[in-house]
Every structure is written in C-alpha cells, then in structure tokens.
Image (cartoon, grey):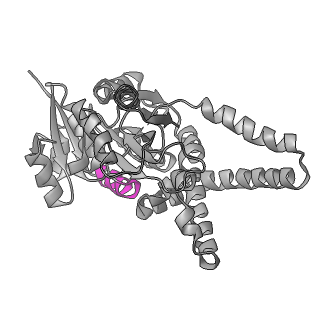
C-alpha cells in the first residue's frame, strides 16, 4: 500500500494534535520536524509522529503534503526558504496561522514557482501548550478555515480537505481578507478589550486595593483570554493591525453610544441596551470557535471539608474528565460557588446529569 507522506513542521500543541488526528488513517505516514531537538525526540517517543526529519528541505522531496504548524513569522520564513527547495509538483503545502492575508501574499511567490499553497487555520486551542498537550480530538467540531489562492484548482483543495477531515473539524473555504476580518471581530479585538479591562483594573487598584480581591466571577471570566501568551498576541496584533484598528474605531463609536445612553437615556433605554445584548448573546452557537472555549458547570455546593472531593468523586466514578476547577469568592453575577470546566458540551451535559441524580446541589450552565 502506497502511503501518503505528510510532513509537519512544528510539533507543538497544534502540530502535534494534527499529527495524531491524521494517524487515524493507516494510509498516512507522519514525518515530523521541530527546531527544538527535545520536542522532536518527545514526539517520536510518544508516537505523535512516525518518523523524525533532520531538516524539512530533505523530507519535502518525498512529501505529499506539508503542514507548517509554526507561528506566522516563522511560517513566512519557511515559505521563503521553500522557494529554493526541490518540491514535487503534486505536493500541497498549508499552514495553521491565525492571520491569513500576509501568508497568502507570500503564497503568491510560491505559486510563481509552481508550488501549491493553501492557507489554513484550525480555530481551536487549549490552556496548555507543547507536544505533551497534543491530542487527536483537539479540533473536533471546531472551525478549520482554508484560504486558497484564486489560481488553486478545486481538486487540490479537495485533496487537502481529504486528509484534514480526520481532525473532525468543520472545514470551510473563505478568502484570506474575509478570514482576517472575521477573526478580528470575534478573536483579535476581544483580546484587546480583555487586556484593556485588566489594565483599567490595575490602575483602579492603586487607589482602591480591595478592588483586585473582588475581581472574580464575571470579571475573571470575561478577561480570561488576557492570560494568553503575550508573544503570540504581539505577533497577531502586528500581523492583523489594520483590521483590529478598524474594530477599535467601531468600538469607540459604540462606547460613545453607551455614554449617550447613560447621560440622556431613560430607564427603558438602559433596559433595552442590556436586553438586546442578552438576546443576541444567548443565540450564539455553543461550539468551539476562534477563542478557546471552556464548558463550565456552576455548582452551588456548601462550604465544608470534602465537598470538592465529593463532586470530583462522582465524576471519576462516571469517567467524566474535567479540565479545570475553581472556587468563586465573589458571586454577584455567577450562579454557584464551584466552577468545573469540561472539554466538550457532551461532558458537561453528562456532569450536569450526574449532579442532578446523585447530589442535592443546584447547578447552572452559563
């Protein structure tokens, strides 16, 4: 049986998870490369890849597919080097970067060399990183965007979709500019807002030190993404600067509208402001999207020794995995003192049923 050889450059969380997902087919041989020798060795020992490459330049000669699972700046450098390599005419190259316009500009140069490049962005992640955190289910039910050039043949896109379907992601083909606009709205700009809210809290805390201790519950939830890797978000912001600036201008207009409502609006105007937001927010799909999604279950447990062990014991007995657990001290806008996070809506649903049938505690799903 002739196997499809897939070269994955970059074996962190994303690259490693793609490698594991593609191994679901016995027709695939996964060849991996990582600039970090320890990461490469770990990937081989853990079975994340079948073979380790000493350098992509040699491995690409026999590759049917090449996936650059590296940060965008590193991918751009690899793409420049790729122009000088011997790449088979049938080979399809893709990436996993979160911004696409700048990548596809470089892809034009590859096309001039006869190299097929289709941009890719699996819109999923985790609070963990590195090859040790890689898992084949990472992308299940998440959107996986593909951004081919206009000159790319449909059968080439279909060929890439053919292997990526093993991730169980929702594959979508969109123009690069459209991708960057959409991600600026639902991912990049919200990160700016979250970071700004934290900065505002830090400034307030200098004069009102107790404020920080109250910043749990809703504040902690809506600013969670501000804890993401600063280097990664520096790169994303620089690469998608124009789209983010456009969103910032719209946000400033929205804040002017809110200020006007506060200054001149009636009680009904203020109610309508919150009601419209609630209706739209409640209608949002409960699926993995551009932001890392946790599936939280809020449980109102009594404050006594052993209560957390009791809850987690129920989940362990029913083999329900949890990804995080924390106690909320300020709960003005949170229903439940104990917040347990799961990796899927299915796990959360099972956990809720477990609590309903096995305990007297009330619970809430946000």
| Residue 131 makes an appearance in the image | yes
Report the side of 11 relative to 172 (left or right): left
Give me the residue at 49% from left, 35% from top: 365
Give me the residue at 19% from left, 50% from top: 33
Report the side of 287 relative to 137 (left or right): right
Question: Residue 5 at what x, y percent from top left?
Answer: 17, 34
Report the side of 165 relative to 50 (left or right): right
264 relative to 197, above or below: above
134 drawn magenta: no
Res 208 → quadrant = bottom right
Question: Residue 364 at what x, y percent from top left?
Answer: 50, 35
| Residue 64 makes an appearance in the image | no
Give me the residue at 60% from left, 47% from top: 333
In depth, the one of 80 and 222 nearer the eye is 222
Question: Residue 151 at what x, y percent from top left?
Answer: 46, 31
81 drawn magenta: yes
In which quadrant will I find the N terminus? Answer: top left
Question: Residue 129 at what x, y percent from top left?
Answer: 30, 53
Q: Residue furthest bottom?
A: 207
Give me the residue at 28% from left, 35% from top: 314
Q: How many marks?
A: 0
Q: Majority secondary structure of the magenta segment?
A: helix
Q: Which residues are magenta?
A: 71-82
In depth, the one of 257 and 161 nearer the eye is 257
140 relative to 214, above or below: above
């Amino acid at each position: 049986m002739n196997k499809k050889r897939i070269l994955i450059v970059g074996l962190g969380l994303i690259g490693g998870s793609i490698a594991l997902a593609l191994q679901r087919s016995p027709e695939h041989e996964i060849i991996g490369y990582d600039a970090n020798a320890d990461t490469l060795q770990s990937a081989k020992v853990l079975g994340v890849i079948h073979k380790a490459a000493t350098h992509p330049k040699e491995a690409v000669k026999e590759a049917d597919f090449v996936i650059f699972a590296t940060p965008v700046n590193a991918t751009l450098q690899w793409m420049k080097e790729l122009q000088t390599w011997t790449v088979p005419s049938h080979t399809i190259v893709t990436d996993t970067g979160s911004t696409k316009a700048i990548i596809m500009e470089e892809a034009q140069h590859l096309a001039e060399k006869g190299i097929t490049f289709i941009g890719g962005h699996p819109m999923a992640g985790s609070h963990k990183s590195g090859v040790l955190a890689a898992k084949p289910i990472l992308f299940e039910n998440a959107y996986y965007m593909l951004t081919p050039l206009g000159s790319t043949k449909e059968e080439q896109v279909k060929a890439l979709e053919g292997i990526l379907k093993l991730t169980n992601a929702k594959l979508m083909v969109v123009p690069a500019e459209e991708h960057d606009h959409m991600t600026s709205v639902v991912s990049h700009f919200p990160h700016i807002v979250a970071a700004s809210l934290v900065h505002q809290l830090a400034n307030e805390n200098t004069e009102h030190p107790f404020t920080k201790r109250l910043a749990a519950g809703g504040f902690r939830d809506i600013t969670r993404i501000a804890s993401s890797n600063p280097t990664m978000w520096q790169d994303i912001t620089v690469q998608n600067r124009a789209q983010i600036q456009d969103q910032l201008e719209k946000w400033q207009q929205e804040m002017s509208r809110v200020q006007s409502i506060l200054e001149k609006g009636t009680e009904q105007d203020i109610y309508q402001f919150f009601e419209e937001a609630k209706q739209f927010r409640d209608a949002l799909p409960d699926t993995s999207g551009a932001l890392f999604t946790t599936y939280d279950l809020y449980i109102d447990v009594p404050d006594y020794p052993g209560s957390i062990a009791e809850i987690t014991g129920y989940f362990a007995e029913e083999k329900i995995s949890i990804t995080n657990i924390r106690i909320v001290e300020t709960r003005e806008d949170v229903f439940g003192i104990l917040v347990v996070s799961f990796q899927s809506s299915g796990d959360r649903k099972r956990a809720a049923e477990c609590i309903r049938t096995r305990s007297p505690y009330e619970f809430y799903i946000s």
